[in-house]
Amino acid sequence: MAVTPRTTSTVDVAVVGGRVAGAALAARLARAGLRVAVYERAVELGPTLSTHIFHGTQDLRAEGVYADLVAAGVPPLPEVQVRLDELRLTFRHPDDPGLCPPRELLDNLLLDRARAAGAQVHLGRPVVGLLRERDRVTGVEVADQDGRVRPVRARLVVGADGRSSPVARWVRATQYLTFRSGRGQVWRYFRGKRLPRVLLWHRAGARLAHILPTGEEEYYLCAQPPVGDPEDFRRTGPDALLPWVERVSPEIAELASGGEPVGGLRRMSGYPCFFRQPFGPGWALAGDAGHAKDATIGHGITDALRNSATLATALLSTWDDQSALPERLGEWARRRDEAELANFWYSQELGDAAPVGALRKAFFRGLDATGVRRLDEVMADKRDADTLLTATRLARTALNQVLSGVPAPEVLREAGVLVRLNLLRRKAFRERAGQAPSLAVSR
């Protein structure tokens, strides 16, 4: 590529990536009066890798797009049905329903709001490098459609460019507590059949499947095979999806049958989950670029909107005093880690390739109505998992298992490895270890 001789542009914030995290952040900053430019590689925002799931409406309402999504035909989902082998749990929240919008619809609505707020939006304009002065990022290099590179000066560059963020790579952002998901995701879209307004999430052994409506007569079917599953969808192709799901859940398979497939299979497997240092001189990371859980927990787009909102608050609180910005962003980064940590570990457990252990299964089986509500709040990202899966409750479950006739050595062995895993996780977080403790310790 050749560098164009045209005059260098100047903005307050250059946002790299125009999907959920980037669009939401750009809208908030532009509404506050900052000059914001969004650079998105894609010429148009179509479907992308995503779990689609919002377990509540709060974040969508805060971004001003909830009513637009419902008006576009995305059905509110007031009920979630979970099956864990023989155990069934039902979560109902009619006053705060879930929503599963197609990503091309959600992303374009958020980007439209960024435009309306005054942000400059440049589709089909990939950022190919960064501008620097000494150790500070001072802008971006943007490729035009003719292949020439145009420099854009910015007081801050935000990478909102996903798990494999080029911005994170260019600034050498430190990554810590990294692990790879123990399962893949294989999904396909369908249309022509109306599904009940409920999200079904079923698990049989180590296999997971879920189905959810994304429109009035549109839905999404997903298989989550553990690593090493004998089914190779790359070889068997899209027709293998429904039979695989039927072996996990005949109920989900029956709902899925009869629809018209839209496109082929979409797949992701072995993807990284991590925290990254989310800021440095002249740069910051938003959404999956800075922190990504295992997708099995379904918190990705909720995390992205929350992270963008708190980053915007941190930036705007001290924008006029740039000397105070590093301290403010340091506080933001610490709070991000503390807020996300418990459910990050829980996402690792949900994404594990092994079946749920007997002690954990007994714990879920013994939940009373309050416990079921709290588990729903964990899955909705409204509660930290460690406030539900406490040492006291696990100890009580272990005692009840022994009293019911389960051999004490078997119970104590599983309880012991859970305690050890928790200690290793605390140590890893305290030391910002590069790799997360392996779940193999709990085998």
Image: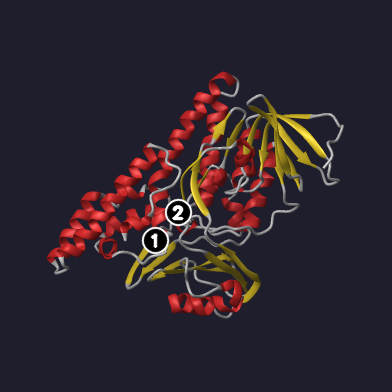
Work out which quarter of the rendered image holds the N terminus and state it.
Answer: top right
Work out which quarter of the rendered image holds the C terminus and state it.
Answer: bottom left
| Disc assigned to residue 92 | 1
Looking at this view, is 390 or 191 the one in front? 390
- Pointer 1: residues within 10 angstroms few (<14), some, or many (20+)? some
* 134 is higher (above) or lower (below) than 157: above
Which residue appears at 54% of the width and 46% of the height? 304
Which residue appears at 50% of the width and 26% of the height? 328
* 111 is higher (above) or lower (below) than 6: below
Determine which quarter of the picture holds residue 187.
bottom right
Q: Are marks 1 and 2 in contact (CB under 8 Å)?
A: no
Label 2, on which residue?
A: 96
Q: In the picture provided, is 140 more to the left or to the right than 63?
A: right
Query: Which amino acid, by three-letter code, is at mark 1?
Result: Arg
Q: In the picture provided, is 222 more to the left or to the right than 432?
A: right
User: How far, Cα to Cα, is label 1 from label 2?
Assistant: 9 Å
Looking at this view, is 181 or 258 the one in front? 181
Q: Position of residue 412 (x, y in %)?
A: 19, 59
Colour pattern: secondary structure
Q: Secondary structure at mark 2?
A: loop
Determine which quarter of the picture holds residue 405.
bottom left
